[in-house]
Amino acid sequence: MEVGLTHYLLLAAAVFLVGMVGFIVRRNTLIMLMCVELMLSAANLVFVAFSRELGDEAGHVFVLMNFAVAAAEVAIGLAILMEIFRRRRSVDADDLNTLME
Amino acid sequence: MEGFLFYLGGAMMLLGGVAMVASRSAVSAACWLVLSFLGSAALFAALQAPFLAVLQILVYAGAIMVLFLFVIMMLEGPVMPAEAGRPKFWIPAGALVPAAIILVATARWVPGAGLPGFPGDLPPGFGQPVRVAQLLLGEYLLAFELISIVLVVAIIGALALGSNERTLPWK
Amino acid sequence: MITVPPVNWPALLPYLVIGGGGLVVMLVDAFVRTLRKDHLTALTGLVFLGAAIAMIAVKPEPGPQLGGMLTVQMYTRFFDFLLLGIGLVTTVYGSAVYSQDGDYRPEFYPLVLFAVLGMMVLVAASDLLILFLGIETMSLAVYALVCGRRGELRSSEAALKYLLLGSFASAFLLMGAALLYGCAGGTSYAALAAVGGTGEGGPLFAVGLGLVLVGFAFKVAMVPFHMWTPDVYDGAPAHVTGFMATAVKAAAFGALIRFVTIALPGLAAHWSGLLTVLTVLTMTAGNLLALVQASIKRMLAYSSIAHAGYLLLGVLAILAPAGGDPGRPLRESAVVQAAGSGLLFYLLGYCLMNLAAFGVISQLGRSGGVEADQVDHYRGLSGRQPVAAAVLAVAMFSLAGIPGTVGFLGKFYLFEAAIRAQLVPLAIWGVVNSLLSVYYYLRVVVVMYMSDDQTEPFDGRNWETILLAGCLAALVVLLGVFPAAVHGLTSLAFGTMLG
């Protein structure tokens, strides 16, 4: 059962696509944020797989940075969500219609 | 062993993702996402990245998802109804079709046949905290400093947004 | 052993001043009790001026810094000055707005500083990791800034939309960076250039490049990744919209130009076909949709999309292969030079005229929870506030590209470069588009000057904002009449990047 780079890339592509499709079809903003997290973790997998292939840890550093960036994005995103929820009592993206003409 | 970890972790990651996208309520979506992250931690371990595997569980599956669940419980628990309709598994599963097409196009994806494995020789101590830290505080020092700015921005932003209509205690 | 790369402090001084200044402003706000908000404005302004002085006074050796993470050269310094100026103007606009509203928002000041720091790093980045972190620093700060109205649903919604789509875009960027890293064996632009320069990176490399470009396309609001722009520009407070329309776009274009010309000349040529289609779509969609807007902020949002299209035309003039032959990476240097200096000149002019316009919009104040947003709100403004009306009129003339303004010369340089690059149909289409755009810009002027003077609820006055916007409008005219010095400067700056 030898497993190589291609296996990992295909898996990451599949996970990335699932996250992308989820982001597009779901309307619950919390789940949309989670879909972005899924896409980011697919990208992380690609980094680590290439690091293994190249024997070079720069990819690991990239992934570490991405952990922190993802945490920061989630923190701000959830803060904005709660701000909206206080007024609107909904986290549905279709309810974000104050700005529609 | 690595092959086993790949199939186990890969299945967890993919199924967790599909179930997350298809789940009706945000709570179960978050739980499925945790499964997906655990799967990717297993993959990191298989890829000789033990440090990242541990951090993936501690930071991602731990801290970030707890934050998610906390907010979901605050917001959604009492008020929000689940999205109407049955869970639509076909939607995320449909995303797998293009992946399958790529797979068939490469057409040689039989375990252990045709595709090369990873190179066997890795530098000693590859992926250990020491080596990653040396890169992080050496070559990538600037990135390390910048990430602290990113986190400060996140703190200021979250604090400012959260402190709505209230004065800060020290003001 | 940890080997720290050599640190060239003089070259890094401006970044340190801005970053350290942001921390100081934050801490002063938190711990100094006897503080009025003017103090914070003054302090932030001092930080911006200090960084500018540091750049003028200390002249470091240009070149890569910190082992090739950043590159400091005249090109990046040009953008640094531009971004510092935009930051300073935004600070003054913002503090005027907050004092009009009687709403003290201390987080605004450090966030603007950190956003500018992120942008400066983004333009100077010579490594994918630094590029990513620069984009994220900028974006996170701007997400929080967009949400800058206490308890107002419109701006919170705009922030959430921007954050969701922005993080979606950064997932693409990250995936692209991962693929580029794997194919090039490193994250530095130099490693990418070694693979991309030959034009042989394999399909994964091409896919990675495409994904990174999608990430950029979101930031510069290129069709079809522009959907967020009108809503976010509309929902954000006007001074923040001005910041986004100018600084974010300038920084993203600055980084994009460096990325494609330095890292990927060979392969970028393969994408020029797709880029041509997107450029045409961006120009056309932006202008057509701007025609039907009743809200001035939405109109400016679509106009910013159209202007992104003109700027992409300049990028294309750099990248488009001669005679359709992708084997030739960069065109002969005279054309590249003309296109590059035209791009920088256009970006400068674009920032000036947009900042002037958004200054006037923000100083008119708010009524009933909204800003002076509808074109009808500007009816008879020339009678009530002649200076503000004149500034807005100059900005509109310049955006429309009327001769005598910087907007005209910017377009002239860009279209001329496009023609020299044998992109004649595209240049003609650009001219047709800018003729089309005259209608919706001049509609605002007509409403201001040729309608009866009605009493409108939006009659805020703020002399600082108007003074600053007036200076910007004067610069718009001045550069429109005497462009030679600045155009020479942009030409020199672009030349340093090509090396």
Image (tube, rainbow, N blue to C red):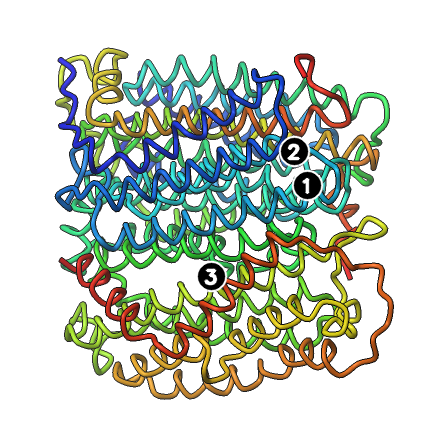
Closest to the observer: C180 or C22?
A: C22
Q: CA distance from mark 2 to mark 3?
A: 25 Å
Where A58 falls versus C416 (above or below)? above
The residue tagged 3 is C351
Residue bearing the label numbered 2: C105
Where does residue A71 sit, x and y in percent of width and height? 51, 25
Residue contact between numbered discs 2 and 3, judged by CB atoms under 8 Å: no
Residue depicted at 83% across the width and 79% down the height: C452
Measured as percent of width and height from the top left, residue C207 is found at 34, 53
Q: Chain of mark 1?
A: C
Q: Position of residue C325 (x, y in %)?
A: 20, 77
Secondary structure state at the residue bearing disc 1: helix
User: What secondary structure is found at the residue carrying circle 3?
Assistant: helix
Asked if residue C192 is positioned above or below residue C44 in the image, the reply reads: below
Say if mark 1 contacts mark 2, CB within 8 Å: yes
Q: Name the kind of residue labelled 1 in the image.
A: Tyr
Please name the amino acid that badge 3 sits on.
Cys
Q: Which mark is residue C98?
A: 1
